[in-house]
Image (tube, grey):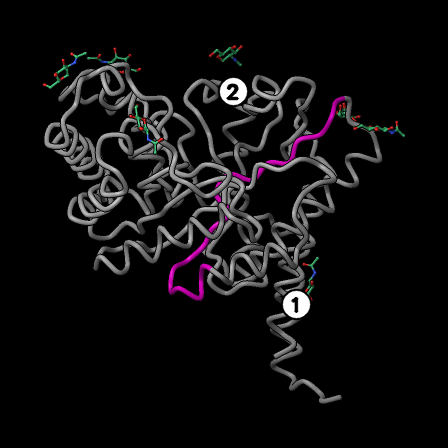
Amino acid sequence: MHLPTKINILSLSLLLASTANAKLNQLAKNAGKLYFGTATDNGELNNTQYVSILSDRREFGQLTPANGMKWEYVEPEPGVFNYTDGSVVANLATKNHQLLRCHNLVWHSQLPDWVPNTNWTKETLKAALIDHVTHEARHWASQCYAWDVLNEALNEDGTYRNDTFYAVLGEEYIKIAFKAAAEADPTAKLYYNDYNIESPGPKSTAALGIVTMLQEAGLRIDGVGLQSHFIVGSTPTIDQQISNMKSFTDLGVDVAITELDIRLLLPSNATNLQQQSKDYEASVGACVQVEGCVGITVWDFWDPVSWVPGVFAGYGDADLWFANFTKHPAYYGVEAALKNGTHKGFKG
Ligand SMILES: *[C@@H]1O[C@H](CO)[C@@H](O)[C@H](O)[C@H]1NC(C)=O
Ligand SMILES: *[C@@H]1O[C@H](CO)[C@@H](O)[C@H](O)[C@H]1NC(C)=O
Ligand SMILES: *[C@@H]1O[C@H](CO)[C@@H](O)[C@H](O)[C@H]1NC(C)=O
Ligand SMILES: *[C@@H]1O[C@H](CO)[C@@H](O)[C@H](O)[C@H]1NC(C)=O
Ligand SMILES: *[C@@H]1O[C@H](CO)[C@@H](O)[C@H](O)[C@H]1NC(C)=O
Ligand SMILES: *[C@@H]1O[C@H](CO)[C@@H](O)[C@H](O)[C@H]1NC(C)=O
Ligand SMILES: *[C@@H]1O[C@H](CO)[C@@H](O)[C@H](O)[C@H]1NC(C)=O
């Protein structure tokens, strides 16, 4: 065993002293990541206790607006743009010196009625798509660290989802969207974002195919977002998540965990909360082990504002903070995974 020098002992003890009380974003940075972040939404920003945790940059170094940048809010009528809701979260991130993941430019869901209801030709839909992406990406160009350019374009079997964009334009719509985004915002990292692509399988393979399709067309794609909406006790293993992440980073793109939450069958008890902690630790641990995984975003951090109970009947308590603002055991699972990365840095 080799003896560390005095300086190493000193800096190690300083770092350990500081990591003992460190919060999640600080630990993520110590582990070599860019951020540990969270989604948030306009309706919850009236809660002062919530906002004080949200705005604590030691805890969260990055924000994602959960809704305000979606098409239905931003372009409710053709050519009429409304940036009000999205700007509230964007400006809060700027004020707090937090990175902003912008979400999203093109998605089959939360569209205003005029998009699916117009009788499009290839030419008119292409023009409307370019117009939407260009206006929106330009509007927030100085503020977005990353854009989810395209969200959830795939079916579970790896075929393309046959939404309005695909039905009219075929896979060409994906190239149109990424090209327009790259031109409108040259600095934001451009992402494809989806769920059930967190472990190897047909859908993940199809997402790899989107990356190579864009690369072969000479278009820019910088990353793939692994949403990671999981269920306690049935998440992919850490090894599956690592090998899946590497399949993307091997193509030269970043990955990020973009929407992590792990729901349990209510009510919570010591057993399912302990399993939830292990499950959070595995996902965050996978990102820590993969160099090209740039950061982790939870899909909000406070149970009462989680989307889960409204969508998955009987499930809840998916986040890191309970309703009374005490922390789930899973908070400490995340902490352990991030600290494991911190220590790894010293092993050389
Ligand atoms: C914040 O607003 C929501 C509705 O958007 C409301 O349900 C909630 O009670 C409000 N919270 C506070 C602390 O005012
Ligand atoms: C823009 O959106 C905000 C927030 O949803 C809304 O209050 C406002 O009325 C909208 N503006 C216009 C001109 O529709
Ligand atoms: C849609 O447009 C096509 C071509 O212009 C036309 O033949 C068709 O009748 C239109 N359909 C509807 C429902 O308006
Ligand atoms: C997609 O949907 C359109 C109608 O909306 C249909 O005409 C077309 O055959 C569908 N394509 C596939 C591949 O299912
Ligand atoms: C805890 O909750 C789970 C459901 O999430 C249930 O299957 C299990 O029996 C409960 N355990 C205890 C000790 O209550
Ligand atoms: C901790 O890090 C080691 C490598 O340094 C890795 O093998 C192990 O899986 C990690 N554990 C967790 C829970 O992340
Ligand atoms: C907060 O809520 C959790 C989950 O319901 C509970 O286990 C805990 O005892 C509560 N803590 C306080 C201080 O009320």
Q: Main secondary structure of the magenta part?
A: strand
Position of 273 with respect to 51 (left or right) is right
User: For this rendering, which residue is in front, 109 or 281?
Assistant: 109
Looking at the rendered image, the quarter that the N terminus falls into is bottom right
User: Quick check: is 259 in the magenta stretch?
Assistant: yes
User: For this rendering, which residue is in front, 66 or 255?
Assistant: 255
Q: How many marks?
A: 2
Which residue does the image show at 59% across and 63% down from the upper left?
Answer: 289
* Residue 57 visible, this orientation: no
Amino acid bearing label 2 = Asn
Give the quadrant of residue 180.
top left
Q: Position of residue 154 (x, y in %)?
A: 42, 39
- Confirm or reject: label 2 Cβ below 8 Å from ligand 1: yes
**C-alpha gap between disc 1 and disc 2:** 36 Å
User: Quick check: is 287 in the magenta stretch?
Assistant: no
Q: Which residue is mark 2?
A: 47
User: For this rendering, which residue is in front, 196 or 301?
Assistant: 196
Q: Which residues are magenta?
A: 248-266
Crowding at dot 1, Cα within 10 Å, few <14 / some 14-19 / many 20+, comes out as: some
Position of 226 with respect to 332 (left or right) is left
- Confirm or reject: label 1 Cβ below 8 Å from ligand 6: yes
Q: Callout 1: helix, strand or loop? A: helix
Q: Position of residue 332 (x, y in %)?
A: 71, 46
Q: Earlier in the sequence, mark 1 or mark 2?
A: 2
